[in-house]
Image (spheres, rainbow, N blue to C red):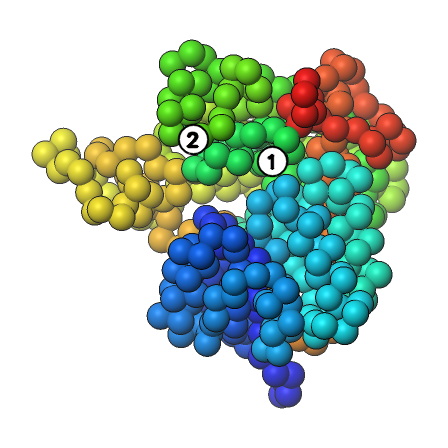
Amino acid sequence: MSTAPPLRIGFVGSGFIAKFHAKSFQSVRHAQITGVYSPTAAHRDALAQAVNDAELGPCRAHADLESLLAAPDVDAIWLLAPNDRRLEVMRAVHAAVKSGRSQVRAVACEKPLGRTLAEAREVLRLAEDAGLAHGYLENQVFSSAVERGKEIIWRRAVPASGRPYLARAAEEHSGPHEPWFWQGARQGGGVMSDMMCHSVEVGRFLLTAPGAARGSLTVKSVQGSVAHLKWTQDRYAKSLARDFQGVEMQRHPVEDFARATITLEDEAGQELIVEASTSWSYVGPGLRIDLALLGPEYAMEFSSLNPSLKVFLSRAITGGPVDSKGGEDLVEKQNAEQGQMPIVEDEAGTYGYVGENRHMVDCFRHGRTPIETFEDGVEVTRMVMALYKSAETGQVVRLPDESLETYVPVPARVGD
């Protein structure tokens, strides 16, 4: 019987992803969200109130980061701030812990770990120098379908016919809701930076044998391409500029489509492939995640938009709840409020947020190493930077490649 106390968590960030995490904690035991900090008072107050209303606290909104880090009821930080603030926050955590002003002992960080490989490596260095346990929040790895599908394939199919050799991953929706996602310097790029980190890591995870070190697979080469399919068109660029102050897709474009082919090698020298594509230019019934794992005599497939629950709404039913955000009360990034509507009954569970937070809480409470750490976040960033370089040069990038240590993707180069 466990005697470890509940993990008391402080959120840094109060936006879309923080709300998703807070919702997932309704299904996570032995954890309390005790503090929230973000620069916008109304947002942090609202999230703290929502946490308390859900009886996940008691939670207090903090007016500054130092106050959150010094709070005696915060054991771990969930770093959920925008990409351009991740390193800044980690420096503050590092300084507070090293000086003794903070008793924080663990930190979990949303994807991506950094906008560049140099940033990701520095985030890892700071965590290790401060003696912090660390976990990389890659939710798709913890999706219930991914976990169950991988377990069945490796237990039933692999012993009879051999390991899987091809993973496919695709994720697409109609575009982000916040302006900083569309700003290359702040976000780190476009959809390649924002969503390809999911796809390459879930592909690598599916191809890795259960219980094996993530380093058991070696990335040998990558080939990437990007495109500007929708949002640089005059009509849509103007709509973004109207909706999001500071977003100028024609002057400072970021890609809204990206494709990747990653070649890996296992310990026996067998070649493995991850094929992935991501898009912000998909208009359909919400966020779509398609995954597949193929081997000599088997295949595993999953699509988030093939749920067991659907409803049909005729054209006579117009509008919708005030807080539905155009159908997003049914599924994230829904683009309609009529017709045949798929419903993801438990988005936080289906997308993996419940599983990842259960895992991180359990590991941090009991001193275990998570299956996704900042080291994995660094490796994901390395793959994404290699893909950007491949897209820029039009060539296959073979790893290791020392130039990636200082590489900055084209859409993130300030002044270009």
- Residue 377 in the image: state x and y as whole percent: 72, 47
- Residue 39 in the image: state x and y as whole percent: 52, 53
Outermost residue to the left: 316
Question: Residue placed at 69% from the left, 50% from the top?
Answer: 88
Question: Residue placed at 70% from the left, 48% from the top?
Answer: 87
Question: Residue placed at 57% from the left, 23% from the top?
Answer: 254
The disc placed on residue 241 is none
Q: Please tell me in which quadrant of the rendered image residue 401 appears.
A: top right
> In the drawing, does residue 288 fall left or right of residue 137?
left
- Residue 379 in the image: state x and y as whole percent: 77, 43
6 up-or-down from 237: above or below: below
Give neighbour class at mark 1: few <14, some 14-19, many 20+ (Cα, 10 Å): many
> In the drawing, does residue 308 fall left or right of residue 253?
left
Q: Which amino acid does the dot numbered 2 rest on? A: Phe
132 up-or-down from 158: above or below: below
Q: Nearer the viewer, residue 104 or 172?
A: 104
Contact flag, marks 1 and 2 (Cβ < 8 Å): no
Name the residue that disc number 2 marks: 244
Quadrant (top left/top right/bottom left/bottom right) for the C terminus: top right
Q: Nearer the viewer, residue 405 or 29?
A: 405
- Residue 180 in the image: state x and y as whole percent: 53, 36
Q: Secondary structure at mark 1?
A: helix
Question: Residue placed at 55% from the left, 38% from the top?
Answer: 291
Q: Which amino acid does the dot numbered 1 rest on? A: Gln
Q: Secondary structure at mark 2?
A: loop
